[in-house]
Image: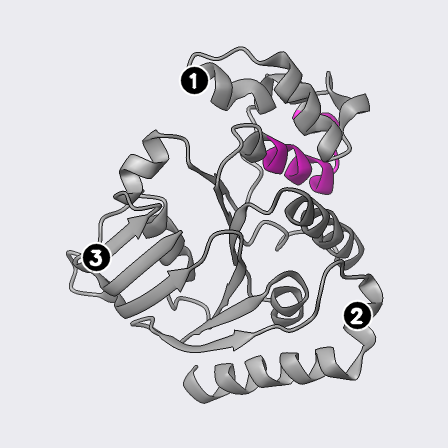
């Protein structure tokens, strides 16, 4: 799904954001990315999305250049903020990607809203929703295009712990149902381990991938997994890598 070879990014100011990134993400995998603030996690996501161009190395998404994969609607991006248009209803916000490519598939919009549990709020405006509901609408908007790759950039970072935990479970349910490929950026090590099948750990800037930790727990995962000693062991392993290279 994603293949990066010696990928690097240096800004015109001379700041090196990323250096020698080598990475392969297989189809249907759920991979999380963690690392210290400013290490280039979000920058790596933007490179994969084709929103910025690398300075060095090669990067392909589904065998294409990232920008080509984006134009073909093979990938979708969920930002840290829900970025809903405040004057449009939830339904109209979710339908927007289809409108932009000339499609009017009302059934798919309805299905996306049902998937994230927002059917009864279909005609509400964003200001009438809680933060968690707005993020669910943002995820529905990404999934309505039926992407093969879903990238999420700290989507739950601004939410309270209870809402965040609930959305973790909902996101896992969606992934277990459709098995799109996921690349999930977070600062929260427990969240990374709970959601993913592998955790990619980045060094401080210039960001490099310094460890790739497998997460062995099968699906479906329950909230009680967070209390198990084996879960704590994987969290400790990831944390140790972070402390070593931060």
Q: Is residue 227 visible?
A: yes
| Nearer the camera: disc 1 or disc 3 | 3
Q: N-terminal of the two: label 2 or label 1?
A: 1
The residue singled out by tag 1 in the image is 100
Q: Secondary structure at mark 3?
A: strand
Question: Which of 205 and 71 lies nearest the eye of the viewer?
Answer: 71
User: What residue is at 23 percent from the left and 63 percent from the top?
Assistant: 8
- Residue under numbered circle 2: 225
Residue 64 lies, in percent from the top left, at 27, 43
Q: Toward the viewer: 140 or 35?
A: 140
Task: Specify the quadrant that holds the C terminus.
Answer: bottom left
Distance of label 2 from label 1 (alpha carbons): 41 Å
Q: Is residue 139 located in the magenta-colored stretch of the structure? A: yes
Mark 3 and mark 2: Cα distance apart in space: 38 Å
Q: Is residue 131 above or below residue 167?
A: above
Instruction: Find numbered disc 2 in the image and state the secondary structure of the residue it sits on.
Output: helix
118 drawn magenta: no
Q: Secondary structure at mark 1?
A: helix
Part of the protein shown in magenta: 126-140
Q: Is residue 86 visible?
A: no
The tag earlier along the polypeptide, 3 or 2, is: 3
């Amino acid at each position: 799904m994603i293949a990066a070879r010696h990928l690097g990014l240096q800004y015109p100011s001379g700041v090196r954001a990323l250096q020698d990134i080598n990475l392969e993400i297989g189809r249907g995998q759920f991979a999380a990315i963690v690392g210290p603030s400013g290490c280039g996690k979000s920058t790596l996501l933007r490179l994969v999305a084709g929103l910025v161009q690398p300075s060095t190395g090669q990067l392909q998404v589904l065998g294409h250049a990232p920008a080509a994969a984006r134009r073909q609607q093979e990938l979708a991006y969920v930002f840290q903020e829900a970025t809903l248009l405040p004057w449009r209803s939830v339904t109209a916000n979710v339908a927007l990607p289809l409108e932009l490519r000339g499609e009017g598939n009302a059934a798919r919009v309805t299905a996306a809203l049902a998937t994230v549990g927002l059917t009864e709020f279909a005609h509400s405006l964003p200001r009438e929703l809680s933060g968690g509901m707005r993020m669910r609408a943002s995820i529905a908007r990404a999934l309505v295009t039926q992407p093969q790759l879903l990238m999420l950039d700290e989507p739950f970072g601004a939410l309270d712990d209870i809402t965040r935990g609930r959305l973790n479970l909902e996101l896992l349910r969606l992934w277990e149902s459709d098995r799109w490929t996921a690349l999930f950026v977070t600062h929260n090590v427990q969240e990374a381990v709970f959601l993913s099948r592998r955790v990619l750990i980045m060094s401080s800037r210039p960001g490099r991938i310094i460890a790739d930790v497998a997460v062995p727990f099968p699906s479906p995962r329950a909230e009680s997994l967070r209390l198990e000693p084996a879960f704590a062991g994987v969290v400790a392993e990831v944390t140790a890598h972070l402390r070593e290279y931060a």
